[in-house]
Amino acid sequence: MVELCSLFSGSSGNSTFIKAGNTNILVDCGESGSHVEAALKKIGVEPDSLDCIFITHEHIDHIKGAGILSRRYNLPIYASVGTWQKMIAKIGKISTDNIRYIQGGVPFGAFDSIVYPFSTPHDSCESLGFTIEHGGKRVSVATDIGVMNKTVYESIKSSDIVLLESNHDVDMLLHGPYSPELKRRVRSSVGHLSNEDCALTSTHLLEQGVKHLILGHLSLDNNTPSVAYATTEEALVMKGARIGYDITLEVASRYEPSAKYSL
């Protein structure tokens, strides 16, 4: 069995729970340790049942509680060399045995699963997304991506469940409160994926047979759940999809766990 649940998603903190066979995985840990523990308990998962943490990149909304949980439960943390170099001073001392280096494009075994880390275009040091496979089923987490490039798409297209960034509405961003410099950063090829680009990607994922799509990492100032949902829903319907039948669609909450998807 494979399960995926977004615990929370957004600029205030990101973490996704994935169960792959007998392995319990956190992808990112961007809230306090106690907040992550409480979210896990809400979905019926005891924090001491975790096996490992995967980190996408070093920004604080993805690593805030990682060191705490690693020390508390003796959890290995998997991240790229560049991410480790940037985050180690932020998360505190980690046991040498729990420092695990991984690389985009190089699969590795994690307990009873195969993990396919892939490089992502973001303004960080060696950021990654993850596709996790167990028993022929695949789930993917792809957020904090400035543009949907071939590497990311090829890495997620064969998954059954995809958590995909839908960060901002372009018009809301352009007319919103951000400084010109920050607007350029968000819109750049190493910034964040827009609703429009997410929607276009969703139509290709639909054609590839993705069953469950979760929209994540929404901007608080330049997006709303209803706008993000409507943009992707419209694109999928235009392609003939029946939402809830051909593909499910959900927006991950900034503060609460999403539905738990099981395969």
Image (cartoon, rainbow, N blue to C red):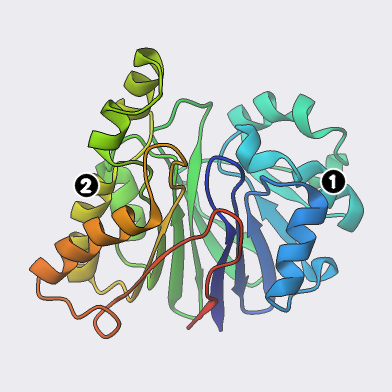
Q: Secondary structure at mark 1?
A: helix
Q: Which mark is residue 68?
A: 1
Of residues 113 and 72, the one drawn nearer to the viewer in this rendering: 72
Picture coordinates of residue 71, whole percent (x, y): 89, 48
Residue 101: x percent and y percent?
A: 66, 40
Residue 55 visible in the snapshot: yes
| Residue at x-position 67% and y-position 47% | 78
- What residue type is disc 1 on? Ile
Tell me the kind of residue under disc 2: Glu
Image position of 46 with respect to 37: above or below: below
Name the side, left or right, on which 37 lies relative to 252.
right
* Sequence-first disc among 2 and 1: 1
Instruction: Say which residue appears at 72% left-offset and 58% top-offset.
Output: 52
Distance (Cα) linking label 2 and label 1: 37 Å
Q: Give whichever of 50, 80 is nearer the camera.
A: 50
Question: Residue drawn at (31%, 25%), measured in percent from left and top?
Answer: 188
